[in-house]
């Protein structure tokens, strides 16, 4: 009588042989899957499966019943099918599964993302005049801010409200950025304006209202300018990431995502800052993510807590609107902060120190 131990040793050997045979079978299934993909036929072939099960039950020597043999082999077929389907799945360029390392987007010598210090994008909602831009550029640059925002083409709900200075605004933005050593970020709304943006801006912002303007995404994707892609007003995270996919697919890898609040039933805020979207965008993609604290809350008293929240969930930077005299601003005059409030903001969030620190020193994790 053999001992249980001796029989178990034989089973261990058989397990290994089975595994070897199963793996060999899986490789063949994968090869078949690739050929099927090439000729465009379906991976699942019920007639072929029935034929294999028939052959197996006919050859069944026992002691398993035919039903058991069928069930065991069906599991094997299913596992092979999964492998074949896996190889068909699109490898999204934005996905962390395609690229594990964090992407770092460089605006000249300013890095955004990964282990770098969180950036601060500050500046007015709209570019209004040379005096306004000079004042704001000088002020923010003195505080260590490197990235200046300002809209020259404004997506306004009301067609009778200020639409922006257009190309003249872009030229003004460039001029003051060069004067104070800043990088210039501005929103592009129409692919036809691309040549002017390529000439004057360092980063092209695609606004919430244009997040799914696929013609614009394709055109900007074919340029090599870094892009700041805002999340649409009612866009799901998947739709936002797919919009980024368009940019990468067209050949532009320098994409930064920006959560700017979404529409919900809530009325106390202009939009609801979706902090889980920031964390999820960081988990699902390898792209840097910013949080726009001005357009999300739409309230000055939320700028500091939303900044802390954004950084706590891993944002790579914050966007905030600042204006020399918000009361007379031509757009978003309730939400832009004046210089005194901006200084308090820097102090309270500790951002003036963060700008020269390493990410782990800022976040503490
Ligand atoms: C802006 O940043 O000026 C702007 C219009 O933002 P959003 O597209 O997020 O509304
Ligand atoms: Mn604004």
Image: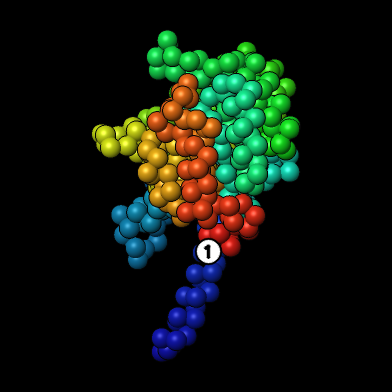
Picture residue at 61% right of the left edge, 39% below the top: 139
Q: Is residue 30 left or right of residue 160?
A: right
Look at the image and tell me whether residue 32 can be seen: no
Label 1 Cα neighbours within 10 Å, binned few <14 / some 14-19 / many ≥20: few
Q: Is 76 rendered above or below residue 125?
A: below
Q: Is residue 332 left or right of residue 266?
A: right
Quadrant of res 137: top right
Residue 128 is situated, as x and y percent measured from the top left of the image, at 56, 21
Where is mark 1, residue-wise? 365
> Helix, strand, or loop for circle 1?
loop
- Residue 163 vs residue 133, the one in the foreground: 133
- Residue 309 vs residue 15, the one in the foreground: 309
Quadrant of res 168: top right
Residue 142 is situated, as x and y percent measured from the top left of the image, at 65, 44
Q: Is 129 rendered above or below residue 262?
A: above
- Residue 50 vs residue 160, the one in the foreground: 160
Picture residue at 60% right of the left edge, 21% below the top: 129
Q: Is 137 rendered above or below residue 304?
A: above
Look at the image and tell me whether residue 224 can be seen: yes
Residue 7 is situated, as x and y percent measured from the top left of the image, at 45, 82
Picture quarter with the N terminus: bottom left
Picture residue at 49% right of the left edge, 81% below the top: 9
Residue 212 is situated, as x and y percent measured from the top left of the image, at 48, 24
Q: Is residue 191 left or right of residue 233?
A: right
Picture residue at 61% right of the left edge, 32% below the top: 135
């Amino acid at each position: 009588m053999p001992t249980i131990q001796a029989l178990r040793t034989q089973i261990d050997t058989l397990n290994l042989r089975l595994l070897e045979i199963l793996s060999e079978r899986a490789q063949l299934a994968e090869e078949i899957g690739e050929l099927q993909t090439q000729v465009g036929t379906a991976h699942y072939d019920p007639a072929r499966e029935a034929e294999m099960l028939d052959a197996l039950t006919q050859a069944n020597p026992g002691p398993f019943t035919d039903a058991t043999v069928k069930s065991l082999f069906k599991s094997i077929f299913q596992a092979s099918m999964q492998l074949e389907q896996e190889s068909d799945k699109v490898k999204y360029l934005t996905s962390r599964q395609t690229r594990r390392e964090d992407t770092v987007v460089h605006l000249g010598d300013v890095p955004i993302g990964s282990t770098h210090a969180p950036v601060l994008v500050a500046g007015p909602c709209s570019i209004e005049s040379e005096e306004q831009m000079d004042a704001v550029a000088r002020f923010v640059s003195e505080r260590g801010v490197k990235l200046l925002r300002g809209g020259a083409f404004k997506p306004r709900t009301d067609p009778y409200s200020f639409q922006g200075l257009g190309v003249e605004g872009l030229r003004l933005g460039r001029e003051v950025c060069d004067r104070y050593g800043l990088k210039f970020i501005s929103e592009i709304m129409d692919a036809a304006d691309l040549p002017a943006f390529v000439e004057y801006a360092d980063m092209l912002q695609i606004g919430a209202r244009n997040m799914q303007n696929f013609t614009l995404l394709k055109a900007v994707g074919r340029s090599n300018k870094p892009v700041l892609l805002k999340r649409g007003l009612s866009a799901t995270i998947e739709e936002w990431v797919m919009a980024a996919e368009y940019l990468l697919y067209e050949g532009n890898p320098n994409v930064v995502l920006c959560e700017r609040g979404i529409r919900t039933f809530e009325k106390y805020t202009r939009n609801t800052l979706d902090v889980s979207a920031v964390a999820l965008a960081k988990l699902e993609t390898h792209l840097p993510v910013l949080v726009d604290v001005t357009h999300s809350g739409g309230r000055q008293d939320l700028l500091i807590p939303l900044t802390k929240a954004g950084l706590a969930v891993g944002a790579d930077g914050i966007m905030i609107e600042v204006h020399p005299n918000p009361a007379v601003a031509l757009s978003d005059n309730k939400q832009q902060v004046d210089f005194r409030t901006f200084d308090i903001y820097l102090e309270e969030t500790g951002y003036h120190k963060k700008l020269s620190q390493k990410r782990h020193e800022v976040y503490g994790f």
